[in-house]
């Protein structure tokens, strides 16, 4: 017996294998390369969704949202360019710069303009339809119609205007979008964004535009109204533009022959494609215009006519335990309720109709607007606040017959609320008594409502959009509040309405309002996504 052997050792154990460090090194390097490739690939895919393969991968991962419908007062900040400005901007770009610009334009549209550097280019002006066809699976937009147009006052610019819609609206769209129909895009009604620009062989420029409002359209002498819908997905593999070169050349040849025959028949000079006429083109007899659904008026708050020197009062204060009493100022006793409600309104405000197209003469079957009786200023003044109209619901609009327009009505445009209203304004600090709040208390107002009282808004704001008589403001937040998401300023939108004769502040300006010069709140609406739309009006002289 061998006493030198340890009893726990196995005399017949297999020898240990040597570790292959080279193989492990290769495996680790491959894993590092795979992780690096995945990291770089994620940047490539998420930062360039305009590429067909990236868009397809993001769709499968459910990391991209379909295009959404914007409101006129909530559209992205942009600049409005006429045909001359559009041609000068994109024709001066080189091929590489134009390719980068097109990628950025498509990327902004796919991202619903959430991360936009600079201003979004919007199209305005008059354009005449050269051809229109139905969209199919071989196009970027797979449902709806697209119209190829020429700028009326600039023959160097072409535009293909997209009309995405459901298949149910196609029959009416085919009857409406005819050759020769004029499309008039105005700043106060239309938000058509440029999503592609193409340089043609002959030096002309062709842009692709899509309306971000996806509204309802009709013609001044048409048969009905059709409504656009945002596309559910895009077929980016089809490529831009939608009218390819062979199809566009054949369309322009047919349109040139059509113009020649029409000019000879009417005795007019023959127009040459690509050359603008010297004289200003006359107004079109028939135009494609966007119409807006009527906004139902809300239930008016109970009010009363008070004497000139009588103070306005607040209703019963809210129950205890809420944050309402923290920033209340200018309090008054509750008012006496009377059975006769009074609403402050414009002296000549027209009644709302389902679809209205303004014309030179009053069309038949449309009731004329009757001016409201003005109150006697020497004895009494209207004291109740007019409520702002409620946001229209997203239910589909039925196809309604368009009202006929007289034959001599040449200057036709869409009815608009531009121009400003008329209401009483006050010197600084002399407005009626009410409750003064800041932007942090707006969510409480959205939950409880105005309750028939006067509520004033103070704070510092930045002008996001400015129009003829309206402006859209955003609360100005500090850097710490923005990083820590205090105050909810990014999800609050202030829509200010100015009286007639007032000039709204320019876009990008900063506005500061205190207890001496506040805005008067007319309504606060809270959307499903938490967005607050605060409607106020200017009451300061």
Image (spheres, rainbow, N blue to C red):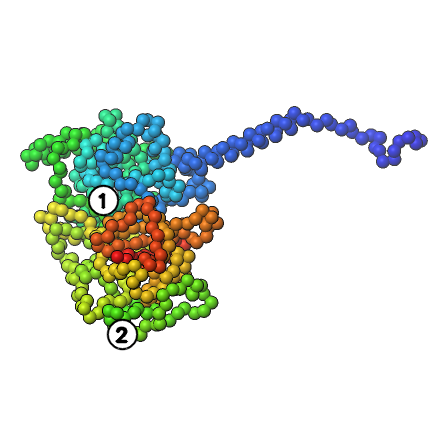
Count up the numbered dots.
2
Residue positioned 33% across, 50% down in the render: 511
Q: Do the residues labelled 2 and 1 touch (CB within 8 Å)?
A: no
Image coordinates for residue 274, horizontal then vertical, percent: 18, 29
Q: Residue furthest left?
A: 267
The answer to whether residue 289 is seen in the rendering is yes
Image coordinates for residue 35, horizontal then vertical, percent: 55, 33
Q: Which of 447 and 527 is in front in this view?
A: 447
- The N terminus lies in quadrant: top right
The answer to whether residue 246 is seen in the rendering is no
Disc 2 to disc 1, how far (Cα)?
45 Å
Image coordinates for residue 105, horizontal then vertical, percent: 34, 36
Q: Which residue lies furthest to the right in this view?
A: 1
281, above or below 378, in the image: above
Q: Residue 339 carries which label?
A: 2
In the image, taking residue 46 as reference, residue 303 lies left or right, namely left
Does dot 2 land on a helix, a strand or a loop? Answer: loop
Q: Residues within 10 Å of mark 2 (few under 14, many from 20)?
A: few
The residue singled out by tag 1 in the image is 186
């Amino acid at each position: 017996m061998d006493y030198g052997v340890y009893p726990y050792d196995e005399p017949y154990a297999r020898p240990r294998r040597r570790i292959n460090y080279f193989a492990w090194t290769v495996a680790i390097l491959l894993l590092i390369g795979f992780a690096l490739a995945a990291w770089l690939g994620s940047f490539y895919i998420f930062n360039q969704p305009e590429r067909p393969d990236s868009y397809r991968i993001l769709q499968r991962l459910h990391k991209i949202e379909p295009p959404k419908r914007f409101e006129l007062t909530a559209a992205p900040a942009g600049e409005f360019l006429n045909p001359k400005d559009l041609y000068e901007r994109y024709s001066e770009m080189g091929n590489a710069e134009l390719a980068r610009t097109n990628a950025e334009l498509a990327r902004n549209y796919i991202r619903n303009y959430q991360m936009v550097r600079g201003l979004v280019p919007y199209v305005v002006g008059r354009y005449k339809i050269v051809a229109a066809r139905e969209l199919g699976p071989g196009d970027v937009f797979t449902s709806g119609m697209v119209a190829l147009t020429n700028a009326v006052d600039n023959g160097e610019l072409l535009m293909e205007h997209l009309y995405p819609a459901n298949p149910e609206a196609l029959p009416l769209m085919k009857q409406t979008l005819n050759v020769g129909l004029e499309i008039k895009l105005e700043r106060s009604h239309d938000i058509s964004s440029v999503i592609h620009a193409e340089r043609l062989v002959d030096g002309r420029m062709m842009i692709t535009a899509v309306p971000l409002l996806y509204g309802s359209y009709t013609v001044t002498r048409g048969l009905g109204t059709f409504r656009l819908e945002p596309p559910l997905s895009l077929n980016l593999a089809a490529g831009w533009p939608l009218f390819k070169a062979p199809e566009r050349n054949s369309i322009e040849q047919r349109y040139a022959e059509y113009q020649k025959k029409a000019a000879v028949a009417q005795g007019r000079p023959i127009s040459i494609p690509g050359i603008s006429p010297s004289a200003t083109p006359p107004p079109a007899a028939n135009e494609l215009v966007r119409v807006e659904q009527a906004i139902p008026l809300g239930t008016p708050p109970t009010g009363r006519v008070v004497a000139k020197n009588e103070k306005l009062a607040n209703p019963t204060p809210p129950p205890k335990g809420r944050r309402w009493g923290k920033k209340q100022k200018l309090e008054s006793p509750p008012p006496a309720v009377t059975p006769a409600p009074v609403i402050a309104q414009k002296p000549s405000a027209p009644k709302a109709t389902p679809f209205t197209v303004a014309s030179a003469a009053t069309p038949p079957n449309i009731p004329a607007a009757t001016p409201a009786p003005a109150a006697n200023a020497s004895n009494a003044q209207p004291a109740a606040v007019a409520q702002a109209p409620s946001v229209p619901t997203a239910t589909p609009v039925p196809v309604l017959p368009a009202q006929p327009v007289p034959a001599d009505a040449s200057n036709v445009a869409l009815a608009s609320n531009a121009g400003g209203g008329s209401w009483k304004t006050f010197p600084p600090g002399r407005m009626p008594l009410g409750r003064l709040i800041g932007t942090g208390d707006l969510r409480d107002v959205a939950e409880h409502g105005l309750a028939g009282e006067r509520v004033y808004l103070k704070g510092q704001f930045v002008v996001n959009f400015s129009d003829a008589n309206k402006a859209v403001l955003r609360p100005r937040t500090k850097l710490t509040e923005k990083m820590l998401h205090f105050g909810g300023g990014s999800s609050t939108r202030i829509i200010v309405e100015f009286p007639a004769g007032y000039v709204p502040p320019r876009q990008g300006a900063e506005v500061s309002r205190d207890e001496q010069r506040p805005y008067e709140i007319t309504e606060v609406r809270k959307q499903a996504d938490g967005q607050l739309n605060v409607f106020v009006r200017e009451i300061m002289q």
